[in-house]
Image (tube, rainbow, N blue to C red):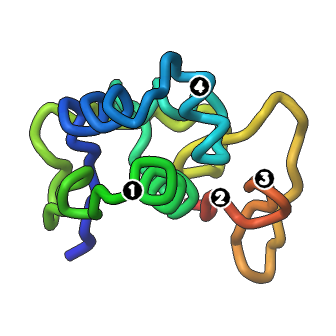
Amino acid sequence: MPYTVKLRITMFERAATLAGFASDYALAHAMGVNRSTIGRVRSGNLQPGAAFIAGALVALAPMTFGDLFEVGTGRRLAAQPAVPAKREGHSHVDHDKTDRTTDRSTGLCGGGVAGRTCCRLV
């Protein structure tokens, strides 16, 4: 069964406040992600990816993975709504407004940060 990762919202917000981040913009900058990504993860519309998790651990040190995230198995964790597919053929979308190409040999999209893949074709 696949594993899912969910943000511990209260702990994340507390850690950000204690670290001195006055806004989501400042926190996003320190994490190396877009401000909107923080909002989508916080609302449950997006599962935190590797860049979000790594950025949170760096920006909110000495917090640990277990402090900020929880891991579940199988079905989505409670209170986490399904992420609607916004582009045909993609399991999720975390792109900016520019069109992205897909490598048909691997099924991976090239829409991630700095050319890293961000989603797999369904």
Q: CA distance from mark 1 to mark 3?
A: 28 Å
Name the image quarter holding residue 34. top right
Amino acid at circle 3: Gly
Vertical placement of residue 3 versus 68, above or below? below
**Alpha carbons under labels 3 and 4: distance apart:** 16 Å
Q: CA distance from mark 3 to mark 2?
A: 6 Å
Q: Position of residue 36 (x, y in %)?
A: 59, 25
N-terminal of the pair, mark 3 or mark 2, is: 3
Q: Could you tell me which quadrant the C terminus lies in?
A: bottom right
Query: Which labelled disc corresponds to residue 118?
Result: 2
Circles 3 and 4, Cβ within 8 Å, touching? The answer is: no
Label 1 vs label 4: CA separation? 22 Å
Q: Quarter-wise, where is residue 66 in the image?
A: bottom left
Secondary structure of the residue carrying numbered label 1: loop
- Could you say which disc has been placed on residue 61 in the image? 1
Residue picked out by circle 3? 111
Q: Position of residue 61 (x, y in %)?
A: 39, 56
Q: Residues within 10 Å of mark 4 (few under 14, many from 20)?
A: few
Helix or strand or loop: what does disc 4 sit on?
Answer: helix
Tags 3 and 2 in contact by the CB under 8 Å rule? Answer: yes
The residue type indicated by label 1 comes to Ala
Disc on the earlier residue, 4 or 2: 4
> N-terminal of the two: label 3 or label 4?
4
